[in-house]
Amino acid sequence: MSVRFVASKKQNTNGVSMGGFRFRVLLLLLLVLVVAMVDSVSGIGANWGTQASHPLPPETVVRMLRENGIQKVKLFDADYGALRALGKSGIEVMVGIPNDMLASLASSMKAAERWVSKNVSTHITSSNVNIRDGGQACSGLVVLGAMIEVMEHELLTGRRDENKGIRDEACENYRRSYVAVGNEPFLQTYNGTFLRTTFPALQNIQSALIKAGLGNKVKVTVPLNADVYESASGNPSGGDFRADIHDFMIQIVKFLNDNNAPFTVNIYPFISLYTDSNFPVEYAFFDGNASPINDGGTNYYNMFDANHDTLVWALQKNGFANMPIIVGEIGWPTDGDRNANLVYAQRFNQGFMSHISGGKGTPMRQGPIDVYLFSLIDEDEKSIDPGNFERHWGIFFLDGQPKYQLNLGTTNSSYLAPARNVQYLEKKWCVMKPSAGLDDSQVALSVSYACALADCTNLGYQTSCGNLDAKGNISYAFNSYFQKNNQLDRACKFPNLSMITRTDPSTGSCRFGVMIQPYYGGAGRIQKGWGVVVGASLFLLTIF
């Protein structure tokens, strides 16, 4: 749209002042420059997982989100405490449905209706939870664009009241709220377990939302791993959906597109580095140090842009060129693997924030990127089947303390704001007795038991506690079990091997934690049992 300025004070026949119009347009154009800068860096989201033995109180997490300017959050399930705390916070919420619920929701419309009633309708009406305003949530640019259109209409027609609803209509058309149906259900390692239940569950949840009167406000989406598409040529332009799931993908993508819903994808350069020893390390980051991939004259200097645009090409080839994309998960872990450390995590996440802050997008998809960092807080009860790093994706430790300096571009600070008023257990630790011997027959059994029921993923080659000696490893295992069991005396009763000390055994980069006080609030919160972490146990048995 071009705006032409005329040096005249003449009013048109309908009484709209040309001078007043020019002033308002000039003001708006100045505001556009400001809002454009804000919109390009605002709206960052975070994944808030709850697989922790000692979660922070939801109210504490919500306050932390707000103080860090994080405006949207993605939940992996409809956690009652989290949803209640998010009520009236102004934070947008994308609420998730776990994969293990897909079969029941796919086979029963009644089950879908009950889920929507309990986990969406109830929280919207009683707690005023903002179940994910999609996109940029009627960003300043959208509003300003609508306002300029209104004023252009006023100039041409002289009527102000006839189209006064344009602003509201622009925002209403822009808002799209989401329920995430499943989480990476087509992941190759699932061996097709959820292939035939994801789409029917998607349909039923959308139908239930419509029946509940939420069809125009809340849509469905499916967070998918980047392994659902591939490129035979190795370049983004060769992108297409995997041959073995192509028909399933088209079915889902068409449904999402028909319902004005986005494609949600999880992109993990770290996983590529973890699984492929030949993957070029620099290509995972955003410093421009990697040798670029040339795709028909377009250079790709980092994996994120190349991966993202492989999806864009896949959508385009199948007739969905303009489908919006949400990056549902992206991040870097800080422990549990030689490439999972604080230095790399800070480098990646800060690099990514700087990369998207200008709002330029990727070579194939210009504009701001809608993204959720993975993740907010560490989770010490996550499955470690993918690797020990799974429990260390947070930009905050389990106690809500920042791991490293990170400027999200959402506040005036270059540092993350920590959780406030966190309550800890006593400053005491369970360690191996100085008199205990490594040749004691109970050592291996005790360590295996402790690690199976606690968290020993910080131990291993080039991890934060990788430099501990054998006794240090044993002490770490004992303390992890002791802290997870709320420092009960009987949790430090390994036969003739352990003792409680008030001297902090932390050394170097290895932190012997003191657990936060347990949180029992939140009606409907599921208390999880402890599973046996076989991988960690077997690993530790080999260090003696």
Image (cartoon, helix red, strand yellow):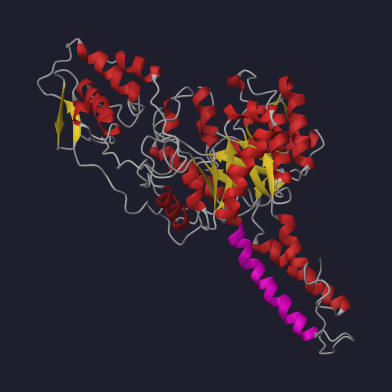
Say if residue 324 shows up in the picture: no
> On the picture, is 234 further left or further right than 494?
right
**Number of numbered callouts drawn:** 0
Report the magenta stretch's main SS. helix
Residue 279: percent from left, percent from top: 54, 26
Q: Residue furthest right?
A: 13
Residue closest to the eye, 287 or 462: 462
Residue closest to the eye, 117 or 488: 117
With respect to residue 371, does 240 lie above or below? above
**Which residue lies at the image location 88% right of the left edge and 77% below the top edge?**
157
Residue closest to the eye, 166 or 219: 219
Where residue 441 sits, quadrant-wise, is top left
Q: Residue furthest bottom?
A: 9
Say if residue 525 shows up in the picture: yes
Residue 24 falls inside the magenta stretch: yes
**Which residue lies at the image location 53% right of the left edge and 35% below the top edge?**
284
Residue 434 falls inside the magenta stretch: no
Q: Is the C terminus in the top left, top right, bottom left or bottom right quadrant?
A: top left
With respect to residue 362, does 468 lie above or below? above
Residue 250: percent from left, percent from top: 77, 30
Q: Is the N terminus in the top left, top right, bottom left or bottom right quadrant?
A: bottom right
Region rendered in magenta:
18-39
> On the picture, is 365 further left or further right than 420?
right
> On the picture, is 289 further left or further right than 343?
right
With respect to residue 433, does 355 lie above or below? below
Residue 413: percent from left, percent from top: 43, 59
Residue closest to the eye, 439 or 337: 439
